[in-house]
Amino acid sequence: MSKPAIYRRWPTKQDLIIAAAESRIGVLSVPDLGDFRAELRFVLTARLEAYRLPGSDRLLAGLAGASADAGAVRSQYAEYTSWTAPSPPPPPPSTGR
C-alpha cells in the first residue's frame, strides 16, 4: 500500500493509530451482569488479554505518544478512550394510589 493510499483513508497519523487500536484491541463493551464486581472483572480480564497480544505494547505506546502530539484532534482520543455507562432503566409506572 502506498503512502497516498494510506493518507486517503487515514488523513493523520493519529487517525491511523486510533484505527489500529480499535482493530487490535476493540471497543470497550461491558455486558450487564447485574453485579459491579463481575462487570469490572470482565472488563479487566478482556483488556488484559488484549494487552498481552504481541505488539500491543508498541501500539499503546504509539497511541499515547500520538495523543500527546494531537493538539486539535485530542477529542478523537477522548472519544476512543471514554466509556459511557448504560442508562438506568426507567422507573416503574405509577399505579395512581
Image: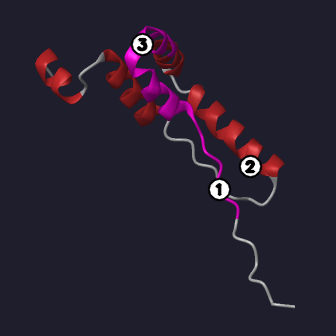
Residue 55 placement (x, y as % from top left): 48, 19
Q: What element carries label 3?
A: helix
86 inside magenta stretch: yes
- Compute the Cα span from label 3 to label 1: 33 Å
Q: Nearer the viewer, mark 3 or mark 2?
A: 3
User: Type of residue at label 2?
Assistant: Glu
Write the start and end of the magenta stretch as one range: 64-88
- Compute the Cα span from label 1 to label 2: 7 Å
Asked which quadrant contains residue 43, the reply is top right
Looking at the figure, which quarter contains the C terminus?
Answer: bottom right
Residue 41 placement (x, y as % from top left): 76, 43
- Mark 3 or 1, nearer chain start: 1
Q: What element carries label 1?
A: loop
- Mark 1 or 2, nearer chain start: 1
- The residue indicated by pointer 1 is 31
Taking 57 as reference, is 29 above or below it?
below
- Mark 3 or 2, nearer chain start: 2
Residue 65 placement (x, y as % from top left): 48, 9
- The residue indicated by pointer 2 is 39
Q: Determine which of the numbered discs, if any, sits on residue 71 in the image.
A: 3
Taking 21 as reference, is 64 above or below it?
above
Asked which quadrant contains residue 75, the reply is top left
User: Type of residue at label 3?
Assistant: Gly
Looking at the figure, which quarter contains the N terminus?
Answer: top left
Using a 10 Å C-alpha cutoff, classify the residue at mark 3 as few (fewer than 14 neighbours), some (14 to 19) or many (20 or more).
Answer: few
